[in-house]
Image (cartoon, rainbow, N blue to C red):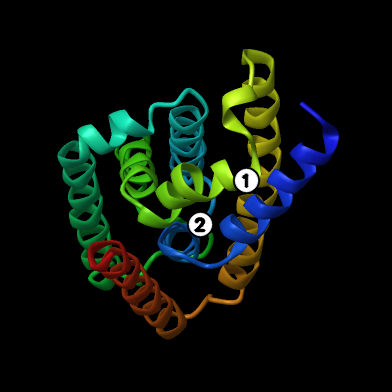
Amino acid sequence: MHLASLLIFAAALFVAAGSPGPSIAALVARVISKGFRDVFPFLLAMWIGEGIWLSLAVFGLAVVAQTFHLAFVVVKWIGVLYLAYLAWKMWTAPVDAKEGEMPREDSAGKLFFAGMAVTLGNPKIMMFYLALLPTIIDLASVSLVGWVELTATMAVVLIAIDLAWVLAASQARKLLRSKRAMKIANRVSATTMAGAAAAIAAR
């Protein structure tokens, strides 16, 4: 693909992915509540989920997504319910952890599933790849090599954006040491996570 096309795609994705939305809200809430050490399965699932949407668009499978719309609706609501469950856990999380001790981690599988559900069920992401992307890139002329180039560009942009959010949330978490501060952080994170669930459900 032409470098100009990749740069235009990268710029559009940077704006779309960098703006706070349900996925970013869920990510930041998770890091503030429990730290960054166990968040990478969630991140990996988010990146793979966006890769799935990109592949659907590039290979002309938008029709498949529309045909099996019910399946994506089910995935969306599973993601909403799981985010709501995580919000409840954060709201009721104990705040008497010892200095430097992290609350009990969720399993990598659960976090991966949550990240995949949030990404595949997020209409904002779906509309970017299935509706906006064709106006940026001539998908009919994208070869297998072009798809690899687009996927690599997508990965670079998403990794840079998401890790920046993780770093910012992690730095904010370092300021929260007292029980009162931890309780406030848990409640704010729970509210943010619930807001992410509501945002997905409302779309």
For the image, the number of numbered tags is 2
Mark 1, other Cα within 10 Å: few <14 / some 14–19 / many ≥20: many
The answer to whether residue 84 is left or right of residue 192 is left
Q: Which mark is residue 158?
A: 1
Q: CA distance from mark 2 to mark 1?
A: 20 Å
Mark 2, other Cα within 10 Å: few <14 / some 14–19 / many ≥20: many
Of residue 134 and residue 36, the one placed in the foreground of this image is 134
Give the mark nearer the N terminus: 2 vs 1: 2
Q: Residue at x 26, y 72 (%)?
A: 91
In the displayed image of the protein, which residue is found farthest to the right? 3
Q: Quadrant for the C terminus, please.
A: bottom left
Q: Is disc 2 placed on a helix, strand or loop?
A: loop
Q: Is disc 1 placed on a helix, strand or loop?
A: helix
Q: Quadrant for the N terminus, please.
A: top right
Q: Residue 2 location, x and y as percent?
A: 82, 30
Q: Residue 192 location, x and y as percent?
A: 38, 73
- Amino acid at circle 1: Leu
Of residue 181 and residue 140, the one placed in the foreground of this image is 140
Q: Residue at x 29, y 28 (%)?
A: 64
- Amino acid at circle 2: Gly
Q: Which mark is residue 35?
A: 2
The answer to whether residue 50 is left or right of residue 10 is left
Say if 136 sits above or below 3 in the image: below
Q: Quarter of the image holding residue 123?
A: bottom left
Q: Quarter of the image holding residue 74?
A: top left
Q: In the image, which is nearer the foreground, mark 2 or mark 1? A: 1
Q: Quarter of the image holding residue 193?
A: bottom left
Say if 40 sits above or below 151 in the image: below
